[in-house]
Amino acid sequence: MALSCRSWLSNEGGKHLFLLFWLSVNVLLFWKTFRLYYYGTQYYYLHRMLGLGLCISRASASVLNMNCSLVLLPMCRTLLAFLRGSKKVMSRKARRLLDKSKTFHVTCGFTICLFSVVHVAAHMVNALNFSLCYSEDFPALNVAHYRDEDPRRFLFTTLPGVTGFFMVLVLFLMCTSSSYSLRFSNFDVFWYTHNLFIVFYILLLLHVTGGMLKYQANLDQHLPGCINPNKTSIDHFPMSKCPAEPFLEVYTESESGMENNSKKICNEAPKFQSNLQETWFWVTGPLCLYCAERLYRYIRSNKPVTIVSVNSHPCDVIELRMVKENFRARPGQYIVLHCPSVSTFESHPFTLTTSPTENRGTFGIHIRVLGDWTERFRELLLLDPNLDTEILPILQQRTYPKLYIDGPFGSPSEEVFNYEVSLCVAGGIGVTPFASVLNTLLNDWKQYKLRRLYFIWICKEIQSFFWFADLLCILHDKHLSGEKYQALNSRLIIGKPRLKLLFGEIAKCNRQKCVGVFCCGPNKLSKELHKLSNKICSHGTQFEYNKESFS
Amino acid sequence: MGQIEWAMWANEQALASGLILLIGGVVGVAGQFRDWEFAAYGVAAGVFVILLEYPRGKRRKGTTMERPGQWFLAAVVKLFGPLTRNYYVRAILHACLAVPGGFILPTVLGTVNLGIASLIYLLAAFRKEEWRPIQAAQTQKGHVGKSIHQPPTNPPPRPPAEHRRKQMDDGRTGAIEVTATP
């Protein structure tokens, strides 16, 4: 029992702890800002005018500030790939957190949507109160031009109103196209609308420059509640319609300290100044970082690659070998392909199946042809050789389309080498990250920590094994020819793998060790592996689960 | 871009707009806005739109993921026949439902979003898309690939592996030698 807790803790503990930390920071920010506006003396008059709406809108704004800045960071893929590669900087536990970067991005995005709803609702109420509680005493505080002005006018005649309106529209478009089913069926819609984020950020930076909410700047000369000898009462807020004074009790507490002074006399009328906007401090950094990363990626991917060879494999898979100057990649990383002849704006990620080495600069990918982009790409690559090529067999000039690649980017499969024992389970074309791992192991396995590798490849059809026929043959031969190789024992089994038994077997053969479990395949498979990794605990073996995701 | 099914996106948008209209209506009523009757309308219209849009329609190709518990509402929506099947009707309906929300502040956003959803539905209608209910018998069991050879028909003892392999109809190019364990 204790051991299974240990397994669960090592698998789930890190990310849950991080989530808890992020949640606490959000709650703290909300609470701190709420209290500032609720009890702060500099906001006394504004609070009297607007009520609870002020506190809720500002508190949700501070949460939004933080999440709008955090949401960009997991998308800096080059930076994350760099962090993954620098083993001295990050421990394995920290690198495993990087696997969850997309989930964190989604969590922040969801929080932004939720708190935007709260923020907008609170501001609607603020608009109503600005209109109803128009103050003749403190004209500087007003947003309305006269009492009972239509609140809809604030939306379209003020900068924060207009920018806020369009921000909600952009967020609406981005949010509705980000649902799982829409990403799954119409990825294009998701991709193009999600790139509207830059409009959102520009509007956000303009939104906060409106300066509609003001604080009192001269508290020394005019403490709220002081007596103005020229006037009979301090404020003329019509009590029936406007929010009641919620913090009067607290105020009288602080006032009681001044009872000896009796009521203070106001030296001058209150002066109001616009709030200092925090958003620029929160958002500018990550936004600049993200823009710099995009620029760097654009420059890096501007030179086209040279396609060396194209091979067609059964079950709709093509293998592409390429070469590019100064291209370095670690096994398990992926690249993003962009082919303008197929589509001007679309790009698609593919895991590298062969990484470039010191001796050989070519690298390769295996593409499974499933959608319209890959089909068109295959058509362009596998030109019909019937017509002219028979005339000049030596100078067979294949005109391949121009191809650009972005990357390489990191993935959890890079960790295979950092465990003493690893279990890799692949479903169908999900074998690609592990193919590059096996390719690397063929060349030089001694420099890595990895000593034993269990590799399970599940395919619907036997023909699929031809995708890596050469690789499997070479591995098989190396094993047979007697090299001292603590490597694979090969079995072919027809039917679903019995994973529970397999885990038990692995646990028995690797007592007291930490086994890295890697999965790249359909969701059901990965869920089962995840469950088993958390549960199985026999013989002191611990299973750490790392999942590769395709979307 | 040619293969996008606009109706799916319009459905997500309309559902979200219904929710926004509902929340705006609640804020309008609770905040006691002037002309709060429009806010009350927003609540009712929002609920109606959510109920209408909750059941997801079937995609033209590929499997469609159902929303949890949508079968009941899908049966109700199916009853209205061409009124709910045709996306022109839906586009006009949403446009009309959206208009009264524009009269008070809290429901303005719901109006605009529902208007956008109505436009996308119009686009879907131009492309001759239709709402069809997801049938229950859509899922099939994953079939095993053809190249896996038939299980042996004769009981053990069976002839050795080489003889069995010769009987296989699918031609292998012999690149891999694998030993099949029973």
Image (cartoon, coloured by chain):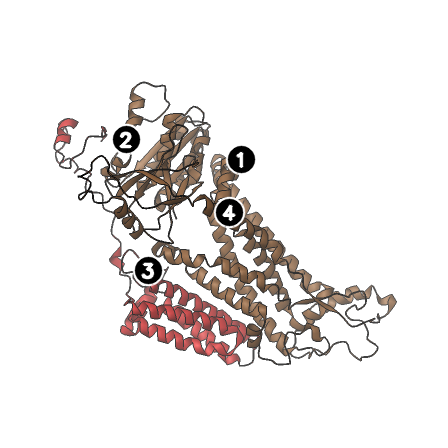
Chain colours: A brown, B red
Q: Chain of mark 4?
A: A
- Camera-side residue of B49 and A43: A43
The answer for how far apart the CA atoms under marks 1 and 2 are is 35 Å
- Mark 2 vs mark 3: same chain? no
Callout in the foreground (4, 1)? 4
Residue type (three-letter) at the residue carrying disc 1: Ser
Q: Chain of mark 2?
A: A
Which numbered disc flags the more N-terminal residue, 4 or 1?
A: 1
Residue type (three-letter) at the residue carrying disc 2: Asp
Label 1: state its secondary structure: loop
The answer to whether residue A200 is seen in the rendering is yes
Q: Quadrant of residue A320?
A: top left
Callout in the foreground (1, 3)? 3
Query: In the rendered image, which residue does mark 3 sit on?
Result: B4
| Callout 1–callout 3 Cβ contact below 8 Å | no
- Mark 4 vs mark 3: same chain? no
Q: Residues within 10 Å of mark 3 (few under 14, many from 20)?
A: some
| Callout 2–callout 3 Cβ contact below 8 Å | no
Which numbered disc flags the more N-terminal residue, 1 or 2?
A: 1
Query: In the rendered image, which residue does mark 4 sit on?
Result: A293
The answer for how far apart the CA atoms under marks 4 and 3 are is 30 Å
Q: Chain of mark 1?
A: A
Residue at the right extreme, as displayed: A260
The percent coordinates of residue B140 (x first, y second) are: 24, 52
| Callout 2–callout 4 Cβ contact below 8 Å | no
